Image: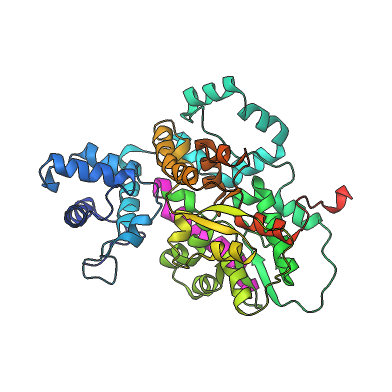
Amino acid sequence: MKTLSLITPVESRQLDKETLRIYEICDGCRRCFNLCPSFNTLLDRIDRYEGDVAKLTPADHHRVVDECYYCKLCFNHCPYTPPHQYELDFPRLMILWKQRLARERGVRWRDRLLIRTDWIGKVGSLTAAVTNRLLGNGTVRRLMETLAGVHRERHVLQFSGETFPRWFNRRRPPASQGAPARKVALFSSCLVNYQATDIGKAAVQVLEKNNVEVVVPEQRCCGMPQFDIGDTQAIQRAAGANVGALHRWVAQGYDVVVPVASCSLMLKREYPELNGDEKTKAVAERTFDICEYLMMLKKDGRLAMDFTNNPGRVAYHMPCHLRDQNIGFKSKELLEAAGAQVDVIEQCSGHDGSWSAKVEFFPLSMKIAAKAVRTIEQNPADLVASDCPLAGLQLDQAGASTHVGGKATLHPIQIIRDAYGLPARVTSESDR
């Protein structure tokens, strides 16, 4: 059966029919049992109705959809994805349902606000000192929970007073090492631009250490948060803007490198499905995760191997959106190249952007994260790492940092920067 399009409107009766078809297959397979809350709910409800998926109620369908946070793990687990004759794409089904429920139930103002990451980032950075203090105030957080439905205990990344693009434009470039080995257009992501800015700085430092020229083009949020409400048209607009900005660099021989897994997944896989034009395909073909890219340099004999600090034992959490890219364990391999002993953790952190911030899902998100933390407890480490800043935040809140002497979870690129002995705080021209 042909997979339903995310762009062409799907008639409700057709979606209902496709949903029952897929649920029947999932019931017979059950390979995704206990993979995520959606499958737990789905299979539990099917069992209650003695295997008759037609008896699922609207409330049952809605809960399955609401508990899906688009980790996409089920797609890689599923033996029936295209080109199999069943053409089963569960994440796509969930997005179609999110579109439908947005039309039927409407979208809460909270949900629309939480996905405006660029706007939140700009306001948060402009008012960083005040905003960070307010977000740490218990009274303010209780008020946010009451008025907006944002859980009072949800830890958040602090805003940076100096955004990453501002730092990049004001910094002092390194001394020329001759012709660059490669050229990179860095898609830093809204998280790195406004909050986890040190990840962007570390990426630039490590790339330039390896004689890679770096530019930071104009960009906007990749659009991944829009999947929460099924707004694929907004994602198409984001894709158009970002591809337009990146393609001019790709056409000049630059590769696109991304330090955040969700964003690299969007550029590589989601954009071409939504906007199938040649420019989008060209950008997708030249997009790489930061550690994937550095391991390409190593394969070509171009990676600097003069590491001065051994990272020790690292508990490395591989984010769901990096696992979905099917590129192997590049971050693990890079850390090992720096001398680290790496234990891989493949359990989901359960954060997913705004999903875990919502009062109705926060307790469930922490329950999911506890599985990963238990694995960290079983393999004591000197450092915890994750390619996703939000996954790192989630792991720290769930207790991972308490098992490594209170050290916060780092991005692998930060550990590599430290292994090279590069300065952890890189100042801009105005600071010198």
Residue 5 horizontal side relative to residue 207, left or right:
left
Q: Is residue 211 magenta?
A: no
Residue lying at 60% horizontally and 50% vertically, measured from the top left: 190
**Image quarter for residue 242?**
bottom right
The answer, for residue 168, to whether it is visible in the render is: yes
**Residue 146 placement (x, y as % from top left):** 47, 22
Residue lying at 48% horizontally and 59% vertically, measured from the top left: 322
From this view, report whether residue 176 is shown above or below residue 111. below
Marker count (numbered): 0
Residue 132 horizontal side relative to residue 364, left or right:
right
**Residue 84 placement (x, y as % from top left):** 25, 70
**Residue 338 placement (x, y as % from top left):** 65, 64
**Image quarter for residue 129?**
top right
Q: Is residue 248 magenta?
A: yes
**Residue 271 placement (x, y as % from top left):** 47, 64
Residue lying at 33% horizontally and 56% vertically, measured from the top left: 74
